[in-house]
Image (tube, grey):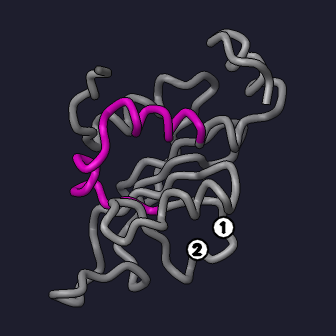
Amino acid sequence: MTQKSRPATADDVHEAALAMPHVRVEWARDNPVYQVGGKSFVFFRNPRKDALDPVTGEPYDDVIVIWVGGEGDKQALVQDADGPFFTTSHFDGHPSVLVRASRLGDVSRDEIVELVQEAWLAQASRRRADAWLAEHGVGPG
């Protein structure tokens, strides 16, 4: 039986993003935006009217945007209505998923680290991505 890692936290997202090579942190107001080669791959966003609490009608204040490899990857993550990942019409056609920091515990630390790594790979240059994959014993993408 494989042991699952502990539940994920927002700190795990930050740590996983910073663990990737060539990462630069920009700031959008008070929220970090993790970039590689000038391209964002994870960012903590400000409350917006496209993601509202269904009970209070207030914008969620803990939404994280994570890039994915493509539409298929996105749909695989958002298809479970009870899962922590979601999207909004604002992100139609955009290769990313949303997750509330307060729902990160619904996935394991290992799963969120892998998702952040895949986000980095989706945005990194081919050369950087291939070098990272080779360093980790995975063939080039």
| Residue at (51% x, 61% y) in the render | 97
Farthest residue toward the right? 127
Magenta stretch: helix, strand or loop mostly: helix
Query: Mark 2 sits on what residue?
Result: 91
Image position of 33 with respect to 6: above or below: below
112 magenta-colored: yes
- In the picture, residue 20 is in which quadrant? top right
Query: Mark 1 sits on what residue?
Result: 94
- Picture quarter with the N terminus: top left
Query: How many residues crowd around disc 1 within 10 Å: few (fewer than 14), some, or many (20 or more)?
Result: some
Q: In this rendering, would 60 be left or right of 69? A: left
Image position of 95 with respect to 137: above or below: below
Q: Depth check: 44 or 26 in front?
A: 44
Report, in whole angstroms, how far the alpha carbon at label 2 lies from the one at label 1: 5 Å
* SS category of the residue bearing label 2: helix
Write down the region rendered in magenta: 98-118
Disc marking residue 138: none
- Picture quarter with the C terminus: top right
Image position of 2 with respect to 34: above or below: above
Specify the amino acid type for callout 1: His
Specify the amino acid type for callout 2: Phe
* SS category of the residue bearing label 1: loop
Farthest residue toward the front? 1
Q: Position of residue 69 (x, y in %)?
A: 68, 49
| Residue at (49% x, 78% y) in the render | 88
Q: Position of residue 120 (x, y in %)?
A: 61, 37
